[in-house]
Amino acid sequence: MNALFKSATTLGVSLLLVSTFVTQPAYANGPIGEHVNHLQANIKDYSEEVEWMVAKVDTLVSNYETKGAKAVNSDDLIEYWESVKFHSAIETNYVPVYASIWQSLYGIKMAIDNNKPASEVRAQQTALNAALWQGLGAVKLAAKFQQKGVLDAVKTTATENMTQSATVDEIKHKLDRVVAKYAERLSDEATSIVHDTYLHLFEGIEGTLIEQDANLVEVLEKDFNVTLPKAISDNKTVDQVRDVITDMQTKLDRAKALIEKAEKTRKDVF
Amino acid sequence: MERRTFIQGLAAMGAMGALPLSLSQAFAATVANPVSVEDLPKLKGALTLYLGRGEGGLYEDVLKAIEKRNPDLKLAIRRGPTAALANTIVAEAKAGIRRSDLFWAVDSGAIGLVSDAGLAQPMPSDLAAQLQPQFRYKDWAPVTGRVRTLPFNTARLTKEQIPTSIMDIADSDLSIGWAPAYSSFQSFVTAMRLLEGDDKTVKWLKKTKQRAKTYAGELGVVMAVERGEVDIGFANHYYTLRLKSGKPDAKLDLAFTEQDAGCLVNASGILALNPDPLATNFMRYLLSTQVQSYLAQEAYEIPLVNGVAQPEGLPSLAAISPPKIDLTQLADLRPTIDLMRNSGVL
């Protein structure tokens, strides 16, 4: 668990950003519950759900190990995950871990469906357990922020003003959601998020950005319109798609610094 | 054209009676000239503004500045996609309620939707008179403009090699970059439909498509022109100006067609839904010298009042010959989308 809080500062910042700009309460697996706005009151449930999930997956993997593929239904893995409230608690609070959970779930499922050795399945299970516990840690931290009143309620409409530099953070968050949806095997939704993020968010900042660094805009344009959609349509691995996005997020960090500089030097209206 | 109202002078002196003397004097002395914010009435009271997203936050800067200058103004802002907000305003009116006092939209089509529903309040004539004559409407104020252009690669072409008729471009041998999914492109096609008719527009789309390369957005189009991937592009003017600002040695220049949809000047606009003078006084701030200058310099938008400099690198409006078209007619995008789909462009 120590590792969970290694990046507490970074995670805290991410949580704040996520909470500020989450605008889509309806997710692929149904609407999120009101419980996500009362994390502290639900921590005990979330903890029990994680333990239950870990045990159920372990039972399924053990059955596969001892009795073979015919003894298990790998689709149950997805049902386990979708049945727990913790699912939406992590989806609304720390998308990168949410993506890792889906990635590991499908890792186990595909290994079973392809009759891979039990050791390979166990490796995926280990990754899943780590992601689940990390997710629980993230939700606990989010609960603390929520208790302190610094974590806004999940909103249903996008009505807040966003500076251009805040828009960059929102773009990065949307890209995290792309990985999550891709890991969930929802490629069309992932692609749709890429296109919407480009049209509704990136387009709003690239005018300013191109005055600061035209080449940076050029490579990000290519990333949004060619590299990332192609990685998704070519069915690259989740890790490969994540690599593309991590690279884009690094470029976006540079974009944010340039935009902040431009915002500081912008003349007053009056 | 029937809804366009040309206002020839200061007719509504009665409305001006409500203004401070100094402002009345300013209007009387400077017909069709912009007013300095120093001469505008202080805004006191509560207003709700529906703000269509656009210009990457620069409209927000303007609003913050207005609020800062008017501490007694309580401004509530609802933000959203322009078309969605226009639909909301119409839906609210049908339900017998009005939640918004003002609507600032990034394109005039959405303004047309609200205006056609009869929800917009008449423009005070002295305010309309500040706008250049071709941008005077009876119930809304264009705030800033943008012109359709043909960015071209200067290493591959000279301006003289580019047809001055948008319809002739379909028959040229130029390679073209376009972004059909982009709303400004669709407004341009709508203008072509209104000016040339559906049949000619379909033929133009089909012919042009054979030599066109599609991009997601119009900055992408302009960058492709600069890279030499295509000879020319269809794009709003500010993308080229901004790219040249960041890359002064870019092999890029602007060409314009003449008196057709290819050089359509579209506009963002604001209208009042509430007859309270506070709403129209708020609109005055957007047409002030300072706001017009700010949007011209920072957003590269075209000021629509006299005496404010154009963005650097753009010819004056007088040197461009845009088509005569009622911008609010651009609201009806559905036939355009159908036509583009039927032509295989979308």
Image (spheres, rainbow, N blue to C red):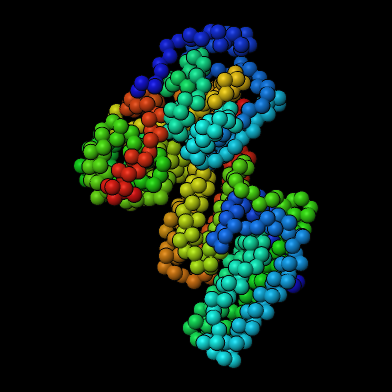
Residue displayed at 51% across by 87% down: A70
Q: Position of residue B204 (x, y in %)?
A: 24, 41
Quarter of the rendering containing residue A73: bottom right
Quarter of the rendering containing residue B102: top right
Q: Nearer the viewer, residue B243 or A134?
A: A134
Q: Position of residue A219 (x, y in %)?
A: 46, 55
Residue displayed at 44% across by 21% down: B137
For residue A6, side relative to residue A255 (left or right): right
Is B302 rendered above or below residue A226?
above
Residue displayed at 57% across by 39% down: B79
Report if residue B177 is visible in the image: no
Residue displayed at 59% across by 37% down: B78
For residue B7, side relative to residue B320 (left or right): right
Q: Position of residue B323 (x, y in %)?
A: 32, 27
Q: Position of residue B92 (x, y in %)?
A: 54, 34
Quarter of the rendering containing residue B237: top left
Report if residue B181 is visible in the image: yes
**Quadrant of image for the N terminus of chain B:** top left
Outermost residue, front side: B95
- Count of number-bearing discs: 0
Q: Nearer the viewer, residue A147 or B275?
A: B275
Is A83 rendered above or below residue B229?
below
Is B140 rendered above or below residue A175?
above
